[in-house]
Image (cartoon, helix red, strand yellow):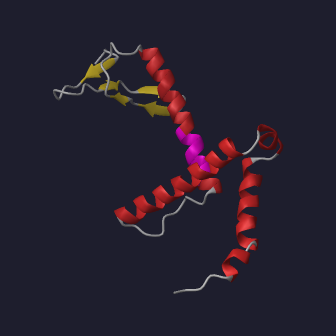
Amino acid sequence: MNAKFQSIHDGRIRPRIKTPVIAGSALVMVLAPLPKQTIPTEKFVEIAHGRWDIENKAFNEMTTFWHADHVYKHTANAIEAFWLVTMLAYNLFHAFITLNLKPAIRQIYTKLHLARAVAAELYTTNDHLANCRAP
């Protein structure tokens, strides 16, 4: 097929499938629920590459620094719960840094340093647990 894009119809959605192309050493296919007239091809590819960069950086950070490289239970609910809790922790941490810390502090310390400081505080501060008792 010589056409760059091929449309598939199901009545409501018209996904476009980009003919496989070689991008570096990878074979790339893009599926999008948009008619070709909605957005120019070049802009769509630019947006898709930007999204891939975000996904790659986020998954790299999650596996490297958040220990999200292995799920110890293999049922669908356990995997979903693991990822939801991990993403919640990730988002709360980044919201804390972005919304709570002054820009000067964010420039001085790395996120890794701040994460280690929070973890150290959690491990060393047990005063709040001294008065807690099980029911």
Magenta part mainly helix, strand or loop? helix
Tell me: 13 left or right of 122: left
Q: Which of 64 and 91 is in front in this view?
A: 91
| Residue at x 39%, y 30% (from the top left corner) | 29
- Indicate yes or no whether the magenta region holds residue 57: yes
* Residue 118 vs residue 99, the one in the foreground: 99
Please identify the residue farthest to the left as the structure is shown. 11
Which residue is painted at 32% across and 16% down in the image?
Answer: 36
Residue 52 highlighted magenta (yes or no): no
Residue placed at 36% from the left, 24% from the top?
18
Query: Is 18 on the left-hand or right-hand side of 116?
Result: left
Magenta stretch in the rendered image? 55-62
Instruction: State the image coordinates of residue 85 (x, y, percent, origin top left).
Output: 50, 59
Q: In which quarter of the image is the N terminus?
A: top left
Q: Return the residue nearer the eye: 13 or 20.
A: 13
Q: With 78 as the anchor, is 2 left or right in this view? A: left
Is 110 situated above or below 83? above
> What is the x, y in percent for residue 78?
40, 65
